[in-house]
Each structure stands twice: as C-alpha cells, then as structure tokens.
Amino acid sequence: MLAVPLAPARSVTNRTAYWGRLSPALAALACLTRVPSFVRPLWNPDEGYLAVQAGLLAQGGHLYDTVVDRKPPLLPWLYEAAFAVCGAGSLTPLRVLAVLAQLLTAVLLASLARRRWGDGAGWTAGVLYLLVSVGLNPEDAQAATFEVFILPCTAAAVWCADRGRWTAAGAAVAAAFLTKQTGGAVLLPVVWQLHRQGATRTGLPRLVAGFAVPVLGAALATDPAGFLFWTVTGSAAYAAFAGSELHVLVRASVNTAILGCASAGLLAPVVRALRVARTGATDLWLWLASSAIAVTLGLHFFGHYYLQLTAPLALLATWALRMLPPERRVSAVLTSACCCSLFLAWGLFAPRPELAHAQRLAGALERRTGPTDRVLVWGIHPETYWLAGRSPATRYLTAGLLTNYSGGRDGSQVGEKFAVTGAWPVFRREMDAHRPALVVDDSRGKPYAADRVPSLRRLLAARYEEVGTVDGAVLYARLPGR
C-alpha cells in the first residue's frame, strides 16, 4: 500500500497567515450553522436526561449508583460543570460548547486535509464539514448531546495518528469512548495508521496506555462495577432487534435519506473516487466504515447516530474533489451550502409539538407541587423534570429503563421482565422512601402504559387518585396518609 503523499513543507509565516484567514471563517460558519440550536430551550430527550443527571449529581448523587444511564460519564460531568459555573436554568452554555466542538472538528479536519493535499484542500474540508454537519432532523443535529461532542475527539484521534503521536491518539479515542461507547470505533483507522507507519512495536504500547489510563480513571472515579454494567454489559435487551423490526428499518431508511440529501454535493465525487482510485485514502475509508458500524450498533438508527459519518465523509469528498476539475469543487460547496440553508430553515421554523407538550406538563407539575416535592414522570421525556424544576423520585429517569421501551418498539419486547436487571426492586424501594407527591402517566397509549405494568398499576391503585389530565397525560396525586 502506498503512503499518503504529504503537501510540501511551509514556513511558519505562511502557516500563521493561512490559519489567520481560515480560522475566523470557520468560526463564523460554525456559529451560523448552530444558530437554530439557540432558539429553543431544549431539542430532545437526551438533553433533558443530561440536564436532570447534572442536577442530581450537583445534589450529591453518584454516577452509576443513584444517577444512572447507559452512557459513559464525560457528558454528564460536562453538563454538571456548566451548570455549576453558569446556573442550571438554561442550556445556552452547552450550546456554546457545542459550537466550539464543531469548530474544533472543522479545524482538525482542515489541518488533516491541508497536510495531505495542500492549502485549498484545508479550506474545502473545513467548510464542507460544517455545511453537512447540520444535515439531519434539527432535534438530532442541533442538540448539545453525545455525537456532537464525540466528533472533535474522533477527529483528534485521526489527526494524532496521522502525525505518529500514539499516546495522544489513544487518549483521544478514550475521550470519544467516554463520551459515548460508539466513539471508540475510530480506533480502527488509528490502528491502520499505526500499521501503515510501521510503528507497531513502539507505538502500540503507547496507544494502549493512552486509551487505558483515562478509561480506568473514569471507572475508578465513579464505581468500577457500575461503570462496567451501565456502559458495557447491561444493555443486551436494549440492543436487541426483536420487537421493532419494521419501525427500525423505516427509521434507518429515513435518516439515511435525510443525510444523503444533505450530502448531495459530496456523494457524487466520493462515489466516482471509489470507482477509479486505488490508493491514498485507506484510513479515511476505514474511518467511514467504522462510523457506519457505530451507527448500526444497537440497531436503533436514531438520527443523531449519523453525525459520526459526517467527518470522514467531508474528508473523503475533499480527497475525491482533487481528482476533478476545479469547478466541481465550487459546485460541491454551493450545493452543500444550499442544502445547509434548507436544514437551517427547518430548525428555525418547524414546530416542536413534543417540546410544547413537555412545557405544558411541566407547568402542571409546578402548580400542583412544591419546590422540594419529588415527582414521578412515567414516560420517555425526562426534560419535564428539568423544565418544572422538580426532583425525580427515582434514579430511573425514563420508563424505558424499567420496560425496555425505546424508539417505537411494539409490545412484544416491552414490559417489566425486559427492564434493566435489578431495576424493579430498586424502584419499589425508592417509591417507598421518596413517596412522590405527584405521578404523571405520560405514556399516552404507548406499550409501557401504566395499566400494562402491574407493579406501577398496583402502586397507583393503593396510594394515588387521578386529579387531572394534560394533553392525554394523566396526573395522580398521593392520597392523604399514603
């Protein structure tokens, strides 16, 4: 396999001038493409989940014990830190951090492209990435959640590997993994670079150490057994394909088509390069392939999963456009800009009925409970707790952890017996200890409805009475003395 040719070396003065022009342009474009993220208080349940987790951690909760999720710890810690500095009433600080994450990703991709193919390629890669990075449903592309913060880590891993900095590459892979497990897929192109550069004997121990130290540190900083269970071994039922085949296949097709439309300017040159080129971008193809595997893992195909494809796709398009006439590069950028403007308009003007429902439900919780009361929202919208400013009565912030409901499963794989192992005994103890002042059944006809969950049905019958409804969600107040 031939080595990737590098662009000629440049003086420090030229390098400074280059980045002095490119960096402000990328910063302006990053801000422009993230404008919709600032127009709504919240974009999706993942943001709500992280916000509630951060509040619980600030109150003395312990990750993977009294505060749980199937995700690694970096993003809950980031939310907690942002709330500690700026207050917990707004996600604006996280939106700003998301802009910086996208800018850092674009700069790293531009640096990779410039080192390999010259100054023009650096501009192309950075601009194309930012344009295509918002090419999904805005609730996926504009939210300050896991994949947005994976991207600079994965780009940094490839950047470090390209320069033979194996300890730093391992640490970057670890950071991606500790943001979300699928971020670790970038290890494939990193290992390929290790092999290609003939550095296996000296580089592999450094790569392993760079990865292992942060991961072990995170496990020790939380609870090692809990960290292993919640991030690796405890999600078998969640990842199962049974019970949602048609729904998942439709979602995969729709989200693939959406990203395909957003990438219309990139796909033609990439496909052409795949037909005619034989060498020069093996690591980028491996990066794209490993990202596609990451999208597939878990068999849910949510839109935000697809963000991991955007960075290698932008680099591959930059590489492919070098083989075409200059006007094709202009056409690719203009096409991507037009697609980007459509997605920005979608984000700015499309209604968000689920957010409006959560806000109305939060208003009802505020009116019916006091600031120190605990409540239970039986649903998949944990943002209701955060919007209402009320603490959850349980560590399980969604009904999904207690029933395995996620993303439209039908009833065959939803119920108490499909819950996270050991969850129901803990839940029952928490209901006895915290005795929520108000229970909200926000299932609205979904397979996890309270009347289909025997333990919850018995709890409501023994201790609560129905006191109202909000958009189909049923409110239950605790009976006196119960």
Image (spheres, rainbow, N blue to C red):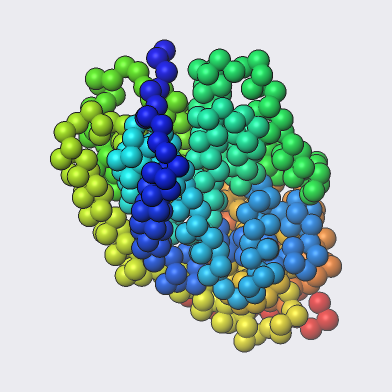
Location of residue 384 in the rendering, given as x and y in whole percent from the top left corner: 58, 71
Nearest the viewer among 231 and 129 is: 129
Q: Quadrant of residue 270?
A: top left
Report the front residue among 102 and 236. Answer: 102
What is the x, y in percent for residue 387?
A: 58, 75
Q: Nearer the viewer, residue 75 or 282?
A: 282
- Quarter of the image with the C terminus is bottom right
| Residue name at image x 62 percent, y 29 percent | 166
Quadrant that contains the N terminus: top left
Q: Quadrant of residue 474?
A: bottom right
Residue at 68 percent of width and 33 percent of height? 210
Residue 411 appearing in the image: no
Whether residue 477 is visible to the viewer of this picture, yes or no, is yes
- Is residue 298 shown above or below 21? above
Q: Residue at x 18, y 44 (%)?
A: 331
Q: Relative to 144, say whether 180 is above or below.
A: above
Quadrant of the rendered image containing residue 35: bottom left
| Residue 365 location (% of width, % of height) | 62, 80
x and y percent of residue 58 in the render?
A: 75, 67
